[in-house]
Amino acid sequence: MNELMVSNLPLLSGETELPEELLALLSERIARYTMGDSTSVTIDTAQRLLEGIWFCVALNEKDFEQGISQSEPLRARWNAGVAQANRLAKRAKLLLKEAEHMQPPLTNLAFRESLGAMPAFFRSYDADFFAQEIPCPLDYPLCQPVSDALTGVEYMTDYLRRWLTESSFLRMFQPDRLQMLYERYYVDYEDLVVNLYLPVAEMATLCALCKKPVCTLLLKQEDSRLVNDLLTCDDETVRTKFLAAADSACDELEITGLFARNYLRDTALDFSTRLIAAHGYN
């Protein structure tokens, strides 16, 4: 087994700014992790422990309300970051409870399996050692994914925030309308790993664009011609029209939250970009 002595840490991390503080903190973390049985661990474990330290240090720097100054010792900043990670975990757990009680009218297998897997995160999450990790599978794809820059409880919190935004939107539509749309869009939506928000958001945007009731999720053939005519305009005009349609859809559905409105706007903008590309290709 490849093991790494604490004294060799700089070779692993490349960190040279605060080697003594870093070595001392990692040494203490290894002793706690091994319950005092060893001063060395595998390279993989040392890397994970080091990433956990820096995750919490960085988290402290983002905490403008309760974070401490960067001039404080590394151990103090790490401790403050651990406390913030635990606070975020409590908030995320509340978001999960809300997600469990606010499911959309129709779901699919990936949605249900991911929702069922999320409690494992809170049973296994360990801010003291591996705060940067996500100890549960999240296979359901969001329409607007979480940034790759986020890990650990930050990732989980943002994932749940986006999950709830999508679920709240879908709850505004009747099950028969959703099923009709899913069967046209995905065919076998129940067993595929597909996002449920995307087709509804796109159709809602098109309905608003064509001045049709958003809640119906239905367009006629002449409406399609209107969209095709719009695509002959310059790209900026098309994108502007789609963003305005997203705003109109939010107004009709009485969506007032800024995050939820921007979520639909981002989806509409992505949709317009794909339609522009497809129209140009044809």
Image: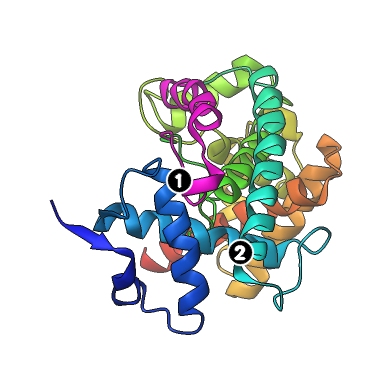
Q: Residue at x 49, y 52 (%)?
A: 132
Q: Residue at x 71, y 73 (%)?
A: 72
Look at the image and give the residue range highlighted in magenta: 108-137
User: Position of 42 compared to 247: left or right?
Assistant: left
The extreme left residue here reads 1
Q: Residue at x 41, y 34 (%)?
A: 137
The extreme bottom residue here reads 17
Q: What amino acid type is highlighted by mark number 2?
A: Arg
Image location (x, y in percent) of residue 175 = 62, 16
Answer whether residue 19 is visible to the viewer in this image.
yes
Secondary structure mostly seen in the magenta stretch: helix
Q: Which mark is residue 75?
A: 2
Secondary structure category for the residue under label 1? helix
N-terminal-most mark, 1 or 2: 1
Q: Quadrant of the C terminus?
A: bottom left
Depth order, front residue of 169/259: 259
Q: Tell me, yes or no, whether the highlighted magenta stretch contains residue 131.
A: yes
Q: Are marks 1 and 2 in contact (CB under 8 Å)?
A: no
Image location (x, y in percent) of residue 140 = 45, 34
Answer whether residue 222 is visible to the viewer in this image.
no
Give the residue at mark 1. 32
Image location (x, y in percent) of residue 152 = 52, 48
